[in-house]
């Protein structure tokens, strides 16, 4: 389990670092930073169900905000990839990246929430 905790901590720290060049890093860096705390705390047997649930809720809000861009990418984004540079002409590319990053984060945090509930050793 410790290896999984390290991998997920590093993944979420990388997500936070990648947001430094985003147009709105003040939103995403703290969000991914808080998400990275969940597996980091698990490394020290300090699972936090409350933290996991709060960050999941924030991620769901972010997904709701970017869902229209994700839908637009799926329906009208033929010929475009997520590796393209940000462009005002195609804002759905950035919104899709945000949506998918948050989806991955929710999956990771759901795993920790499940683990915390199962262990019944949660801390605030």
Image: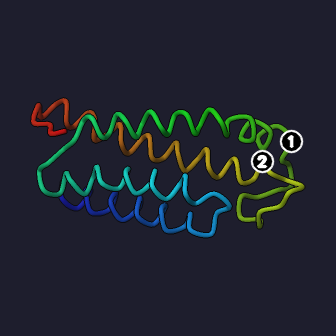
Q: Earlier in the sequence, mark 2 or mark 1?
A: 1
- Relative horizontal placement of residue 36, taking residue 58 as reference (left or right): left
Looking at the image, is 105 positioned above or below residue 44?
A: above
Q: Is residue 110 above or below residue 44?
A: above
Mark 1 surroundings within 10 Å by alpha-carbon count, few (fewer than 14), some (14 through 19), many (20 or more): few
Can you name the residue that lies furthest to the front here?
A: 26
The answer to whether residue 37 is above or below residue 57 is below
Q: Is residue 52 above or below residue 18?
A: above
Residue ID at (76%, 58%): 81
- Residue 7: quarter of image: bottom left
Task: Classify mark 2: helix, strand or loop.
Answer: helix
Q: Nearer the viewer, residue 73 or 33?
A: 33
Helix, strand or loop at label 1? It is helix
Could you tell me residue 83's position as x and y percent?
71, 64
Residue to which mark 2 is pinned: 92
Considering every residue shown, the one lying at the far right of the view is 89
The disc at residue 76 is 1
User: What x and y, as percent, mark residue 116?
Assistant: 19, 36
Counting other residues with Cα less than 10 Å from the Cα at mark 2, is it few (<14), some (14-19), or many (20 or more)? many
Q: Residue at x 68, y 35 (%)?
A: 67
Is 63 situated left or right of 2 in this image?
right
Instruction: Provide residue 68's location: percent of width, then percent of height.
Output: 74, 35
Residues at marks 2 and 1 touching, judged by CB atoms closer than 8 Å:
yes
In this view, the mark in front (2 or 1)? 2
Q: CA distance from mark 2 to mark 1?
A: 9 Å
Visual colour scheme:
rainbow
Q: Residue placed at 71% from the left, 58% from the top?
A: 82
Relative to 46, 109 lies left or right: right
Q: Is residue 115 left or right of residue 80?
A: left
Between 65 and 42, the one lying in front of the other is: 65
Say which quarter of the image contains residue 61.
top right
Quarter of the picture holding the C terminus: top left
């Amino acid at each position: 389990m410790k290896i999984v905790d390290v991998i997920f901590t590093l993944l979420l720290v990388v997500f936070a670092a990648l947001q430094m060049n985003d147009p709105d890093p003040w939103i995403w860096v703290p969000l991914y930073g808080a998400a990275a705390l969940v597996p980091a705390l698990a490394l020290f047997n300090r699972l936090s169900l409350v933290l996991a649930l709060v960050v999941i809720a924030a991620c769901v809000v972010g997904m709701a905000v970017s869902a229209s861009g994700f839908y637009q990418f799926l329906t009208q984004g033929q010929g475009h990839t997520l590796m393209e540079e940000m462009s005002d002409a195609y804002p759905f590319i950035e919104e899709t990246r945000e949506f998918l990053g948050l989806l991955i984060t929710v999956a990771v945090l759901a795993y920790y929430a499940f683990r915390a509930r199962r262990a019944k050793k949660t801390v605030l």
